[in-house]
């Protein structure tokens, strides 16, 4: 159930507002066309709950530069 995934993700980010902000931004970035948004959201919550707080909060500056070069 998604509520279980949210509670697991809250162990990484204890601020619920911050969790919602990060999960929504990550869902928009990771979503692939022709897939269900619910599956993408569940995947994002799993990724957040599996990582450490420092990894989740890291600023992906280098990732954006690589995406610009590829485009």
Image: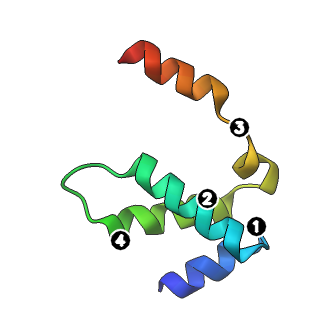
Upstream in sequence: badge 4 or badge 3: 4
Which image quadrant for residue 11? bottom right
Upstream in sequence: badge 3 or badge 1: 1
Upstream in sequence: badge 1 or badge 2: 1
Residue 37 point in image, percent of width and height: 32, 65
The vertical placement of 35 against 2, above or below, is above
How packed mark 4 is, by other alpha carbons closer than 10 Å (few <14, some 14-19, many 20 or more), is few
The vertical placement of 5 against 56, above or below, is below
Give the residue at mark 4: 38
Secondary structure of the residue carrying numbered label 3: loop
Give the residue at mark 3: 59
Give the residue at mark 1: 13
Q: CA distance from mark 1 to mark 2?
A: 10 Å
Q: CA distance from mark 3 to mark 2?
A: 12 Å
Give the residue at mark 2: 22
Upstream in sequence: badge 3 or badge 2: 2
How packed mark 3 is, by other alpha carbons closer than 10 Å (few <14, some 14-19, many 20 or more), is few
Q: CA distance from mark 4 to mark 2?
A: 16 Å
**Residue for point 46% across, 69% down:** 42
**Residue for point 79% across, 73% down:** 14
Upstream in sequence: badge 4 or badge 2: 2
Q: CA distance from mark 3 to mark 1?
A: 16 Å
Secondary structure of the residue carrying numbered label 1: loop
How packed mark 1 is, by other alpha carbons closer than 10 Å (few <14, some 14-19, many 20 or more), is many
Between marks 1 and 2 in the image, the one whose residue lies nearer the viewer: 2
Residue 10 point in image, percent of width and height: 72, 75
Residue 44 point in image, percent of width and height: 51, 60
């Amino acid at each position: 159930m998604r509520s279980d995934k949210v509670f697991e993700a809250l162990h990484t980010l204890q601020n619920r507002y911050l969790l919602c902000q990060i999960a929504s931004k990550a869902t928009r970035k990771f979503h692939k066309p022709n897939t269900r948004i619910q599956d993408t959201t569940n995947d994002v919550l799993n990724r957040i709950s599996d990582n450490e707080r420092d990894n989740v909060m890291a600023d992906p500056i280098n990732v954006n530069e690589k995406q610009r070069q590829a485009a």
